[in-house]
């Protein structure tokens, strides 16, 4: 859940809620609401958080990038079409 990730990443950076809020130009109560799961950051802040914490937006949003296409049984022409 994004709430837990924000809190863990913030603490790992040694930032208080107020310090994170100041970096983002928002209120401490907004950061607290994110961490409590009361609200979620807008897309703008998800991008800013990812940049600040040096993680991907996919990581923050808990998306897994493990999609793959099985090309087993395809001939060379079919593989080239897939690629």
Image (tube, rainbow, N blue to C red):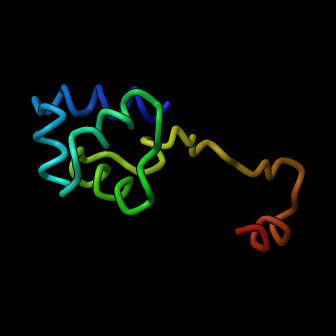
Q: Which residue is located at x 46 percent, y 41 percent?
A: 39
Q: Which residue is located at x 23 percent, y 53 percent?
A: 26
Is residue 12 left or right of 65 when viewed as pictured?
A: left
Is residue 38 left or right of 72 when viewed as pictured?
A: left
Q: Which residue is located at x 30 percent, y 33 percent?
A: 32
Q: Position of residue 51 (x, y in %)?
A: 26, 55
Say above or below: 76 vs 51.
Answer: below
Q: Nearer the viewer, residue 59 or 81?
A: 59
Q: Quadrant of residue 77?
A: bottom right
Q: How many marks?
A: 0
Q: Position of residue 59 (x, y in %)?
A: 44, 41
In the picture, the quarter occupied by the C terminus is bottom right
Is residue 78 left or right of 34 when viewed as pictured?
A: right
Q: Nearer the viewer, residue 62 or 82?
A: 62
Q: Position of residue 2 (x, y in %)?
A: 45, 35
Q: Which residue is located at x 80 percent, y 52 percent?
A: 71
Q: Quadrant of residue 34?
A: top left
Q: Position of residue 66 (x, y in %)?
A: 61, 42
């Amino acid at each position: 859940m994004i709430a837990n990730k924000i809190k863990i990443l913030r603490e790992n950076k040694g930032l208080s809620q107020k310090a994170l809020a100041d970096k983002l130009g928002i209120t401490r109560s907004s950061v607290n609401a994110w961490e409590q799961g009361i609200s979620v950051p807008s897309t703008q802040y998800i991008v800013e958080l990812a940049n600040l914490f040096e993680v991907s937006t996919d990581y923050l949003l808990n998306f897994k990038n493990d999609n793959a296409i099985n090309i087993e049984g395809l001939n060379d022409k079919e593989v080239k079409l897939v690629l």
